[in-house]
Amino acid sequence: MAAKINSKKRKQIKEILSKGHKKYHCIFCKRVFLVTDLTIEHIIPKKDGGSNEITNLVLSCKICNQHRDRADFCKYVIWMNNRIIGKPCGTKSGGNGNRFYKKRRK
Ligand SMILES: [Zn+2]
């Protein structure tokens, strides 16, 4: 099993994953947090043989980290994305469904 990450290494990993920013978004809910408030999340959990390599690590908020628990990474990302986006545009109740696209128009 992969060794525990010490606090010095943790800081380095967070710096790499946040690309040096002070604030960064949670991989799951996309909300922005101070990097110090984010946790290091294993894509493949350590219990399932996941490593501490940077390619297996992402930043997530504490809420998502706890909520995901041992759920499959991809499934959790898809589930979370559906929750954020909600109903597709053009549905009856989605009167304002296009507002995200309008913002991007030049
Ligand atoms: Zn989150």
Image (cartoon, rainbow, N blue to C red):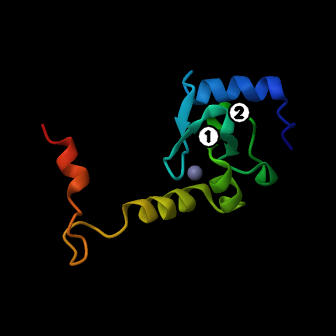
Reply above or below: 98 against 40. Answer: below
Reply above or below: 83 against 11. Answer: below
Coordinates of residue 44 in the picture (x, y in percent): 68, 49
Coordinates of residue 82 in the picture (x, y in percent): 42, 64
Query: Which mark is nearer the camera, 2 or 1?
Result: 1
Mark 1 crowdedness (10 Å alpha carbons): few <14, some 14-19, many ≥20: many
Element class at badge 2: loop
Q: Residue flagged by tag 1: what amino acid is it?
A: Val
Coordinates of residue 7 in the picture (x, y in percent): 82, 28
Report the label total: 2
* Residue drawn at x 74%, y 46% as measured from the top left: 50
Q: Quadrant of residue 104?
A: top left
Q: CA distance from mark 2 to mark 1?
A: 10 Å
* Front residue of this view, candidates 75 and 13: 13
Is residue 1 rendered to the left or right of residue 30? right
Coordinates of residue 42 in the picture (x, y in percent): 69, 45
* Residue drawn at x 75%, y 40% as measured from the top left: 51
Element class at badge 1: strand
Q: Mark 2 or mark 1: name the one nearer the start of the chain.
A: 2
Residue that mark 2 sits on: 53
- Quarter placement of the N terminus: top right
Q: Residue flagged by tag 2: what amino acid is it?
A: Glu
Whether the residue carrying mark 2 lies under 8 Å from ligand 1 is answered with no
Residue furthest to the bottom: 92
Residue 58 disc label? 1
- Quarter placement of the C terminus: top left
